[in-house]
Amino acid sequence: MASISIRMEMYPDTHYAALAAGGDEGAFACLVDRYSRKVHQLILRLVDSREDAEELAQDVFMKVFRNLGSFKGECSFSTWIFRIAYNTAISATRKKRPLFTPVDEGVMECLPEVSEEGGDRIAYLRRAMEALASGDAAIIMLFYMEDRSVDDIASITGLSASNVKTRLHRIRKRLFVLITQNEGV
């Protein structure tokens, strides 16, 4: 096991992808080790069910394995695998349209500032994230937790970069409203 983690640190994803495309199961195991948690987290944000997320993550890695030969390196490997994960999860949730509550601009201007005091801010944020539509939660996760650029998110989601920027702006507003509602402000 230690040899795999040492091996993972030594080479970039593209090296392992090329080896795995040639049938090297150890190289594919390195990629699975490197991305399984992140892929699972992304899918979980989209499907809201641990069991479904685990099953879909397995589907993603099966798709990755079958399609490694089609990875041309035009984007980073991580962007490529996140795109597969995102599309797989979206396809699985198409029948379940999430509810979206638009944020009224007038309401936003009337809300007081969120207090910096108290350790409950993280709890408020978690509750607010859970209340977001799954696609919105995934965009926030990719941007803030995975530190992906707007262009990467656009590539992963199939949205335009300007649409990603607009959605990030609206999601931040929505989070603000949800957090202040949780605080009882």
Image (cartoon, rainbow, N blue to C red):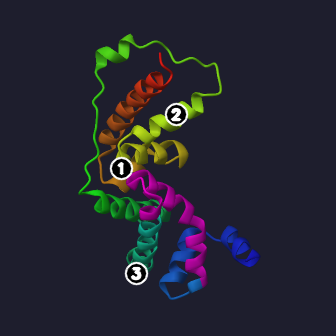
Residue 131 higher or lower than 102, as above or below:
below
Q: Mark 1–mark 3 contact, CB under 8 Å? A: no
* Residue 94 located within the stretch drawn in magenta: no
Determine whether, in the image, residue 19 is placed left or right of residue 171: right
> Residue 15, position in %: x, y?
57, 75
Residue at the spot of label 2: 125
Q: Secondary structure at mark 2?
A: helix
In three-dimensional space, the C-alpha distance between marks 3 and 2, rounded to whole angstroms, equals 38 Å
> Residue 53, position in %: x, y?
44, 62
Q: Amino acid at mark 3?
A: Arg
Residue at the spot of label 3: 66
In three-dimensional space, the C-alpha distance between marks 1 and 3, rounded to whole angstroms, equals 24 Å
Q: Earlier in the sequence, mark 1 or mark 3?
A: 3
Which mark is in front, 1 or 3? 3
Q: Amino acid at mark 1?
A: Ala
Residue 49 higher or lower than 15, as above or below:
above
* Region in magenta: 26-53
Residue 76 higher or lower than 27, as above or below:
above
Residue at the spot of label 1: 154
Q: Secondary structure at mark 1?
A: helix
Which mark is in front, 1 or 2? 2
Most frequent secondary structure within the magenta stretch: helix
Residue 153 higher or lower than 113, as above or below:
below
Please give the name of the residue rendered at 46% of the width and 39% of the height, measured from the top-left corner: 129
> Residue 31, position in %: x, y?
56, 72
Q: Earlier in the sequence, mark 3 or mark 2?
A: 3
Pointer 2: residues within 10 angstroms few (<14), some, or many (20+)?
A: some
